[in-house]
Amino acid sequence: MNLEELKKLKEKAQRQVALREGSKKYRVVVSMGTSGIAAGAREVMKTMLDEIEKRGLEDVEVRVTGEVGLEDVEPVVRVEEAGGEKTTYARLDAEKARKIVAEHLEKGKKVDNLAVGKEKKSE
Amino acid sequence: MIRAHILVCAGAGCISSGGNALKDVLAAELKKRGLDGEIKIVETGCMGPCDLGPVMLVHPEGTFYQRVTALDVPKLVEEHFIKGRPYTKLLPKDDVTANVVTTQRDFSFFAKQEKIVLENCGLIDAENIEEYIARDGYAALGKVLTSMKPEQVIAVIKASGLRGRGGAGFPTGVKWELMAKAPTKPKYVICNADEGDPGAFMNRAVLEGDPHRVLEGMAIGAYAMGANRGFIYIRAEYPLAIKRLNIAIAQAYQRGLLGKNLFETSYDFDIEIRIGAGAFVCGEETALMRSIEGRRGQPMPRPPFPAQRGLWGKPTNINNVETWATIKPIILKGAKWYASFGTEKSKGTKVFALAGKIRNTGLAEVPYGTTLREIIFGIGGGIPKDKKFKAVQTGGPSGGVIPAQHLDERVDYESLQKLGSIMGSGGMVVMDEDSCMVDVARFFMDFCCDESCGKCPPCRVGTRQMLNILDRICTGEAELADIEKLESLASVVRDASLCGLGQTAPNPVLTTLRYFRDEYLAHVVEKRCPARVCRELLEFRINEEKCVGCSLCARGCPVHTIFKRDGLKKFYIVEDACIRCGACLDACKFDAVLKTSDGVHARSVTPADLATSSTRATKPVMKK
């Protein structure tokens, strides 16, 4: 092995452990309360996971959370930008979820017609 | 996409508290719920808080779970991974702040540490070289081989101020330089993994949790000193560490990170494991080398030092596991960065193994200069059951006992030496008010006496005689002159022994005599043990006012010496036959059994006792 190969191997391997280190640019939080699950939040999340993988996006982490208080517009997903804006998307399905990944997470453009409100990150 | 990693601690501590089945149970549960494609399970090395084991850490949230059993797994998976909330039942409570801890960062135990040696321990899969490489693994070796001369490497290590972590604290850079100058070839490097102090497990954790780091450090050192062959001397009592080392070595060879022409240079380096049978004396470098050569592990007089004539008569360098594990970050981040940690003479960080009467038993890495109080109370969480801190034993059987008045002492090589103890390899055994200091000294002397190789008489005979005196003190048979004898023997053993084992064996005795002389005097003069530990000086009695006559004590007594008073629902212990095992004390649910050690004056027999003892044999409560 030479230095170049080691560097390549490191870059490849880093993807395996990146999740354990530091925060990512985008944090996707899927609401997984009872109503969220009933409305299909799991399918939405799975679609997003697949889509993120397919597009090879590295700087994204996906978390789940409990009820967020928007029961009537579930499934709800919140996209948080590190140190920046939080966008809440509602009434999602697999198709819309793919769109969010393609537009917001990959290109950094919010999908305004799916968003229900914007708030400045308070933390 | 994998959205979460479950890091399951697979260090020896968590495995022995029942963690070995966790990974499989978790995997089965995730599969059952269709989560196996989005959540990954990783077995890591020791995370540190061994007392809370089995532990696991869930990323990206950083949620830390303690005492996870297989039965908890279904609920944990449902709560955390399906419903997205922490499973509160398994969250630890912070002993320092008294808060429930939701993430690892909030836990005082972790928050106050500075992890350099343990940076990967508990974070990466020790059996996967790629995870080590992801954390800059082997980048230091690559840098050294392709862009640095051996002298430059030594200069960096010297400038970093790194001192040997095995105990004596000799400057590593100076040691390497001596070896590099030795003209003879071939040369060897050795990793001393013969960790044998009671209560110390730092090296084991590094080898189990991040074995590649040690291999990389050895390869760098060997290059700097001109050696092409290395040995890891490890005791057979560490099977898991040996297994992971073997895996690591095989993976490194497979990737070309050990063996011939490393990083396409002309440098070759090979590593072999040598397994020792677990004799304490083999941690001493000359005995260790003899053991590697296949001979009896006995020390040799120095000089010649190993750097002049070591393994098979060739120049040899021996460093401790932790020393080797520190090389990589120094090379990558620079000597200046490393020297910014610690005190003026003791640079960097040290891993301590916290054991004994302390809440957070486990591993903690802190910069030198941290106070004992911060380590024991700030990180260790203090003494359980609100008992009083009495002393801390540092450095194992070679070290000494440090009492409460020195708790604010900053820990480094010099300050501990000043207190009569040593840094040693980093074991810290905490003692509370229930620990008898004479008994502690006896325990360590027993250990040294047992482990003495027998080659030199001061150690072979001296430790035995010291142990005999300590035995007499603990059983109340000693006289005042025995304490003087003990002190003079201690100085002979210390000055005349051949190797470190004997030279340091009197330390526990000397420090306990220095700080707890009153306890020795209580044993010798008053024939009592203030901490109520030494069995021969104890007395068990039943407080008849509290006794309800339930007979639990009598039934638990192994020598059947507890009887019922005639016509009364009260029990009493017949002193002469009592072996003072304390079984009655454990059995009693009404606090009616008293353990006392009031000494020779209190042990007179009252007329009432005589009257009752005459009837004792006629009416046993329980049959055999």
Image: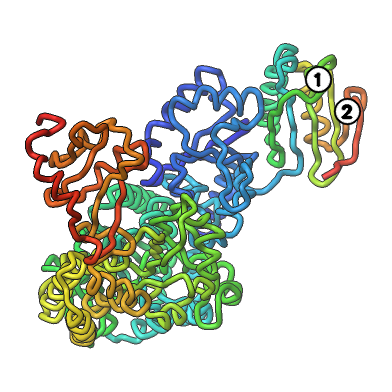
Which residue is drawn at the image coordinates 43% and 32% (left, top)?
A: B23
What label does residue A111 carry, if any?
A: 2
Residue type, mark 1 in image:
Lys
CA gap, disc 2 and disc 1: 9 Å
Residue placed under numbered mark 1 in the picture: A96
Which residue is drawn at the image coordinates 82% and 47% (left, top)?
A: A83
x then y, percent, for residue B331: 53, 70
**Quarter of the figure that contains the C terminus of chain B:** top left
Relative to B143, say whether B555 is above or below: above
x then y, percent, for residue A3: 53, 60
Seen from the viewer's position, the closer of residues A17 and A1 is A17
**Mark 2–mark 1 CB contact (< 8 Å):** yes
Seen from the viewer's position, the closer of residues B385 and A98 is B385
x then y, percent, for residue B9: 45, 42
Observer able to see residue A80: yes
What label does residue B332 carry, if any?
A: none
